[in-house]
Image (tube, helix red, strand yellow):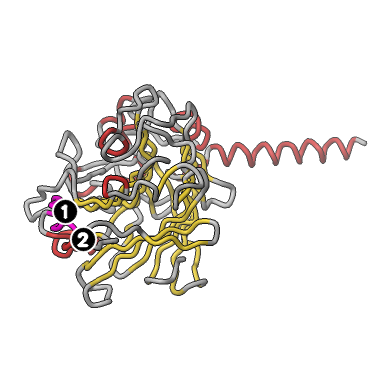
Amino acid sequence: MFLLVILALAHCSSANDAVENYLNQARTTGALDFTVQVCSSLGNCQPLATGLVVDNNWRGVYYNLCYDPKRCDKIPTVSEYQTLFGLTVSPSRTHLNLTYVANAPGPRIYLTTGPGTNSYQMVYLLNRELSFDVDLSTVGCGLNAAFFFVAMEADGGTKRYGYKGPVYGTGYCDAQLASTNKPTCHELDIIESNSLTTLLATHTCNASQYCEPTGCGFMPYPLGQTKFYGRGRTFTVDTTKPFTVVTRFVTVDGKDTGNLKEIQRFYKQNGRIIPNPTVGGNFNSVSDAYCRYYGLNNLGGISASMTQGLKKGMVLTMGLWGDLKNPDFMGWLDKPPYGPCPVYSNPNPRVTYGNIKYGPIGSTA
């Protein structure tokens, strides 16, 4: 009996140690374990161990020093990632779940090269295809589930600005106007979406790093395709159910070194392949011709300018942001003429991104 008690205590101690080690994982390694897949051909994808970190500014909500990217000294634990920022990773490490947290809504989450490293994972998309699953069924009006890329420095601004680096979530940039500790850079919005409307957009920059804040976007709803994407079976893409987003970056010569020709999109749901809708001008993709036809901002053209950002490599960024108390907060995304809001809200929104894959065109879906 005494031996059984000792063995039981040892087992409990080991289990408790394992839980404690897991809960402190992010603090000791700098990131949450996460896995994406890099594909070489259809059905031939290999797991790539990566990590997830939260932007330094959202750490600053709780730890004021982290508003300064040169001084931030907070690495959250796994449990803090969940309670403070609403972030959890599935046991398979392939799915990121983001729950809206009122105290710090909309944290930006970045992909790194993995726990224990201090570098962002640079993704190169020219002549490539990207796919991922998403469930945004509870994301209503006034919110934005965003899955996008920005041309951040791999070292998070360590060399250029003296920032603390990716372990601390520093170095963010985008195509919006520059602000304190945030320069401008190329931005590629794969989806800016809720369950009512969706946007695919490029934000290009010129040689002086002046960038387009509005960009050139493909948005089915204001282009007349009001029944393509929305809540319920009457829509082609039913956002009350999970679906897969597939985006292709076609080059002019079919080579990795070529300039971007167009960005193609299709969806998969319930075993069906769903093409992007065709809109006025007979367009169903983003190209220089599409942007010109609709008179959308396209500084330098996607072929000339967006190519530069894609050749540099970009960092995957994920988030869920907005204002639960103000359904008009995302009016540029989901209110007429851009969407049908306010028609749906949920007091406990969350989004799941998973099964992220990239590789040669035709290899991920």
Q: Position of residue 36 (x, y in %)?
A: 46, 58
**What residue would you read off at disc 2?**
281
Q: What's the amino acid at mark 2?
A: Gly
Q: Position of residue 326 (x, y in %)?
A: 34, 24
**What residue would you read off at disc 1?**
294
Screen quadrant of the N terminus:
top right
Q: Position of residue 179 (x, y in %)?
A: 16, 35
Number of numbered discs on residues:
2
Q: Is residue 178 above or below residue 191?
A: above
| Residue 194's disc number | none
Q: In the image, is 291 to the left or to the right of 339?
A: left
Question: What residue is at 23 percent from the left and 77 percent from the top?
Answer: 253
- Front residue of 186 and 216: 216
Question: What residue is at 15 percent from the left and 51 percent from the top?
Answer: 296
Residue that extends furthest to the left in the rendered view of this protein: 208
Q: Earlier in the sequence, mark 1 or mark 2?
A: 2
Q: Dividing the picture into quarters, in which one does residue 339 lie?
A: top left
Question: What residue is at 18 percent from the left and 60 percent from the top?
Answer: 302
Question: Secondary structure under badge 2?
Answer: loop
Q: Dividing the picture into quarters, in which one does residue 289 lie?
A: bottom left
Q: Are marks 1 and 2 in contact (CB under 8 Å)?
A: yes
Question: Secondary structure under badge 1?
Answer: loop
Residue 155 in view here: no
Q: Nearer the viewer, mark 1 or mark 2?
A: 2
Span of residues in magenta: 290-298
Q: Is residue 283 above or below residue 213?
A: below
Q: In the image, is 311 to the left or to the right of 234?
A: left
